[in-house]
């Protein structure tokens, strides 16, 4: 082994540091490309490791991105709670706009929101899937409380709002295909103008309609 090759992390602290380095590399690559295009080899190359050595720290490529999805939930919910608490206007369109803008400001998170149920959760151990689900449920509970402090809706209605916001953000982001050849194709052909998805305003309209329908009479 050359002197420049990374040594195996032996202490708990060193192992955690190596895991964070791997996550940071995956985060950077995922932000530059579509998550589905980033391979385990790409991540290994970015951190200067052999692909097989990566398996000492994460069971699969999907586990790496699933952990980044959980991280994205924590960061998004924390930021959104602060934003919601500062609102003086709690009309449906205002709440919807806050939700939509906070999601579209996080492109990697939107990508991960679509990839998690379709791919990531299906290619990890049941233990890893359970840990991820519990982490997300904790964030949903936290945001549920924050939403109900601002608007008069039931607990189940708040869950519906969160599920719709995150589910539609992931789906619309895939449809929008930002930074891809498909997006260029859509924008360069007027007959395909209907395929050009502007995620934030469309998501705002959907959530406004949902919240308006939930408003107490």
Image (tube, helix red, strand yellow):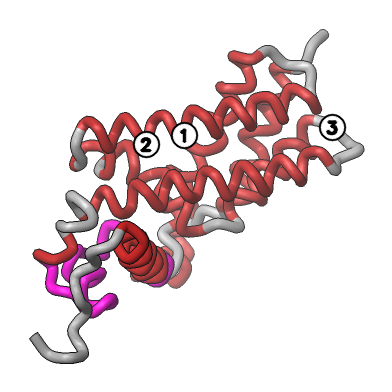
Picture residue at 19% right of the left edge, 70% below the top = 8
Q: Nearer the viewer, residue 92 or 2?
A: 2
**In the rendered image, which residue does mark 2 sit on?**
132
x and y percentages locating residue 139 in the rendered image = 55, 34
Task: Tell whether 159 sits left or right of 70.
Answer: right
Magenta highlight range: 29-51
**Label 2: how many Cα within 10 Å (few below 14, some 14–19, many 20+):** some
Q: Identify the residue at the far right of this view.
A: 88
Tag 2 secondary structure? helix
Q: Identify the residue at the far top of this view.
A: 217
Tag 3 secondary structure? loop
Q: Is residue 26 above or below residue 125?
A: below
**In the rendered image, which residue does mark 3 sit on?**
90
**Label 1: how many Cα within 10 Å (few below 14, some 14–19, many 20+):** some
- Answer with mark 1 or mark 3, whichever residue precedes in sequence: 3
Picture residue at 57% right of the left edge, 30% below the top = 162
x and y percentages locating residue 197 in the rendered image = 51, 53
Picture residue at 41% right of the left edge, 70% below the top = 28
Mark 3–mark 2 Cα distance, whole angstroms, equals 31 Å
């Amino acid at each position: 082994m050359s002197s420049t090759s990374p040594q195996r992390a032996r202490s708990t602290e060193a192992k955690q540091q190596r895991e964070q380095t791997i996550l940071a590399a995956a985060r950077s690559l995922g932000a530059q490309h579509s998550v589905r295009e980033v391979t385990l080899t790409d991540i290994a190359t970015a951190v200067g490791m052999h692909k097989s050595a990566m398996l000492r720290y994460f069971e699969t490529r999907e586990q790496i991105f699933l952990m980044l999805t959980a991280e994205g939930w924590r960061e998004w919910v924390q930021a959104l709670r602060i934003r919601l608490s500062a609102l003086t206007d709690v009309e449906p369109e205002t709440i919807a706009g806050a939700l939509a803008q906070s999601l579209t400001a996080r492109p990697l998170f939107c990508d991960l929101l679509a990839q998690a149920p379709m791919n990531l959760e299906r290619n990890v151990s049941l233990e890893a899937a359970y840990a991820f689900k519990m982490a997300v449920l904790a964030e949903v509970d936290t945001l549920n409380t924050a939403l109900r402090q601002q608007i008069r809706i039931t607990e189940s209605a708040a869950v519906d709002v969160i599920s719709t916001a995150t589910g539609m953000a992931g789906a619309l982001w895939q449809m929008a295909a930002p930074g891809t050849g498909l997006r260029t194709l859509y924008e360069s052909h007027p007959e395909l103008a209907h395929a050009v998805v502007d995620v934030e305003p469309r998501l705002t309209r959907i959530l406004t309609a949902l919240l308006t329908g939930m408003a107490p009479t």
